[in-house]
Image (tube, rainbow, N blue to C red):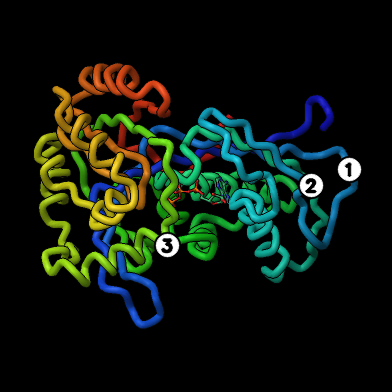
Amino acid sequence: MSNGAQRFSASAPGKVNLHLGVGEARSDGYHDLVSVFQAVDRRETVTLVVQDAPPVSTGSVVTGMTTTFGVRCPEEHIDAPFNLAWRAVDAVVDEYRRSGAEVVTALPPVHIEVDKQVFVAGGMAGGSADAAAALVAADAYLAEFAGSELGRDTLHRLAAQLGADVPFSLMGGTALGTGRGDELVEMLTRGSTHWVFLNPKVGIPTGQAFGLLDDLRHNDPALVPRLGTATVARALTRGDAHELGRAMHNDLEAAATTMRPILVEILAFAGALPGVARSMVSGSGPTIALLCRDAAAAEQVLGQVRERYPDYESFGATGPSPGAQAAQ
Ligand code: ATP
């Protein structure tokens, strides 16, 4: 990497599910989801650093990547071509090369830097945020070196191909997601939400959580899918944290707590703290999201949670936050 190299940066938000309704298992093994997503201002930043090397006309423009961890570094090595940020840059360049431009310009190689602030495999869509930020950064790089960009609509199409949560990471704000969670409609909100996120040191493989939910439903007829979102929508427009807390729901929480009983204890402890409107497992977990009454309460709750669980990672964040956007 040469000093003074050209850089293209973008950031994208982590997310919390205010509602996650999981339909019955379909014959193809997938579940229809009804999800209310909110983006929070805990953001990932992705930077493409242009390399001082000959431009390329075929194959990947990515020479490598380096993730810097503001959260616990996972055991697995993620700076590899399977990384969603890497795949997003490849997707943008492939789309440009396929787009029928009369002359396809050779493009300079890039190294990807990721500043990771969202828990890895925590159920907060950190990898999807990296993908969304990489899409936006790669489009700015294209505009510079190919003289044309793909634009937001094409980026949304590529986002859906990269993963179910990527379109929301691109869009941000608060949205209702149906289908795989990637058919999105913006939702009205009033004011801000104030959160504390806590990541217990347990892994929950998403596929296993869905499978267990199917089993639990088989044995307990009370565990019906909750697919309605009217109460959450109403609470969001009123901007009342306690009303929103009562309306929040996650069908997967039963599976997460059955798999990892420690979550039951944490949910009960955190849910009883003054100023907490609701404690809930975020998405497929294991992250626990604590919705707080206001910013001051969130600060206090963060302190109490850290005192009680010094070994677990935690941070505060505010929602809603914008989707992927260019950064300096
Ligand atoms: P979701 O909330 O969308 O289910 P998550 O936040 O639980 O996602 P991620 O951190 O996005 O989970 O990633 C889960 C797995 O995806 C990782 O264990 C890793 O193998 C792979 N992965 C691919 N790209 C990335 C990335 N950029 N950051 C983290 N993990 C990635």
- Asked if residue 139 is positioned above or below residue 202 in the image, the reply reads below
Residue 253 in view: yes
Q: Where is residue 5 in the image (x, y as percent from the top left)?
A: 78, 31
Give the mark nearest the N terminus, 1 or 3: 1
Q: Do the residues labelled 2 and 1 touch (CB within 8 Å)?
A: yes
Amino acid under disc 2:
Thr
Sequence-earlier tag: 3 or 2: 2
Q: Which of 55/22 is in front?
A: 22
Residue 216: which quarter of the image?
bottom left
Q: How far apart are marks 1 and 3 (CA)?
A: 42 Å
**Which residue: 24% across, 54% down?**
254
Q: In which quadrant will I find the N terminus?
A: top right
- Find disc 3 in the rendering and name its residue: 207
Q: Is mark 3 within 8 Å of ligand 1?
A: no
Q: What element carries label 2?
A: strand
Q: Which residue is drawn at 15% across and 62% down?
A: 228
CB of mark 1 within 8 Å of CB of mark 3?
no
Q: Foreground: 30 or 12?
A: 30
Q: Which of marks 2 and 1 is nearer the N terminus?
A: 1
Q: Can residue 186 be seen in this view?
A: no
Asked where in the image residue 46 lies, by quadrant, the reply is: top right
Q: Which amino acid does label 3 sit on?
A: Gly
**Distance between mark 3 and mark 2 Cα atoms:** 32 Å
Helix or strand or loop: what does disc 3 sit on?
helix
Identify the amino acid type marked 1.
Ala
Residue that badge 1 annotates: 53
Image spot of residue 188 (x, y percent): 21, 47
Residue 41, by quadrant, is top left
Find residue 63 and name its label: 2
Depth order, front residue of 257/191: 257
Give the total of numbered labels. Answer: 3
Q: In the image, residue 251 lies at what x, y percent?
A: 23, 57
